[in-house]
């Protein structure tokens, strides 16, 4: 990510709040974590209920396609947080260290930002929350990204 650092920082109390949450789920104090954001139709359907949103259906993904990566990361010692404000269905991974943060009652707006800004890597199928790790200079893996012509912003 070069020599540039984020221009935005969390206050001491915000950092404590975020670390208190992480320490409540970590098995070791320094355990690293990954965020996983997979786009489906639920958010747009909720936000634009009176509009035809099917023109974007090709961008939606099946969360079950990401079970193996979450299980592998957890087996390698990472915590994995499945992100999302609105999701079609639960993640469905029953592995130690994998949290369906989007639908298990843990989710808050603050933690969306804190986790996205402090994860080791952010895996995404390209959706709005991607801007947070970008702002905080967190490495990202973007999958299922089309059309590729728009990739310049995320380079």
Image: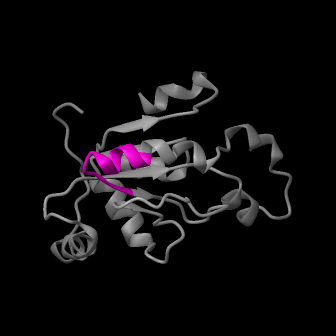
Q: How many marks?
A: 0
Say whether residue 92 is left or right of residue 135: right
**Magenta extent:** 70-80
Which of 61/117 is in front? 61
Percent x, y for residue 63? Answer: 59, 50
Q: Residue at x 59, y 64 (%)?
A: 90
Is residue 114 shown above or below 54? Answer: below
Q: Residue at x 30, y 44 (%)?
A: 138
Percent x, y for residue 118? Answer: 27, 55
Q: Residue at x 24, y 73 (%)?
A: 14
Quarter of the image holding residue 108? bottom left
Percent x, y for residue 62? Answer: 64, 46
Is residue 57 shown above or below 47? Answer: above
Say whether residue 31 is left or right of residue 115: left
**Hey, which residue is sitting farthest top in the picture?**
149
- Tell me, yes or no, if residue 114 can be seen here: yes
Which of 115/100 is in front? 100
For the N terminus, which image quadrant? top left
Say whether residue 68 is left or right of residue 43: left
Q: Is residue 71 magenta?
A: yes
- Tell me, yes or no, if residue 135 can be seen here: no
Which of 115/9 is in front? 115
For the C terminus, which image quadrant? top left
Quarter of the image holding residue 146? top right
Percent x, y for residue 68? Answer: 47, 43
Quarter of the image holding residue 98? bottom left
Q: Is residue 73 magenta?
A: yes
Say whether residue 139 is left or right of residue 4: right
Is residue 131 shown above or below 92? Answer: above
Coloring scheme used: one colour
Q: Residue at x 82, y 46 (%)?
A: 54
């Amino acid at each position: 990510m070069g020599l540039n650092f984020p221009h935005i920082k969390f206050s001491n109390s915000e950092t404590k709040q975020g670390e208190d949450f992480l320490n409540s789920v970590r098995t070791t104090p320094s355990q690293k974590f990954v965020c996983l954001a997979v786009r489906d139709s639920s958010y747009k359907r909720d936000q634009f209920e009176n509009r035809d949103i099917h023109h974007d259906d090709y961008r939606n993904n099946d969360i079950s396609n990401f079970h193996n990566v979450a299980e592998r990361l957890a087996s390698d010692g990472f915590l994995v947080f499945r992100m999302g404000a609105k999701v079609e269905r639960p993640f469905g991974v029953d592995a130690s260290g994998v949290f369906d943060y989007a639908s298990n009652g843990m989710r808050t707006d603050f933690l969306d930002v804190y986790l996205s800004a402090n994860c080791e890597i952010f895996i995404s199928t390209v959706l709005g929350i991607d801007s947070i790790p970008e702002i905080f200079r967190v490495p990202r893996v973007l999958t299922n990204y089309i059309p590729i012509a728009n990739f310049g912003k995320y380079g």
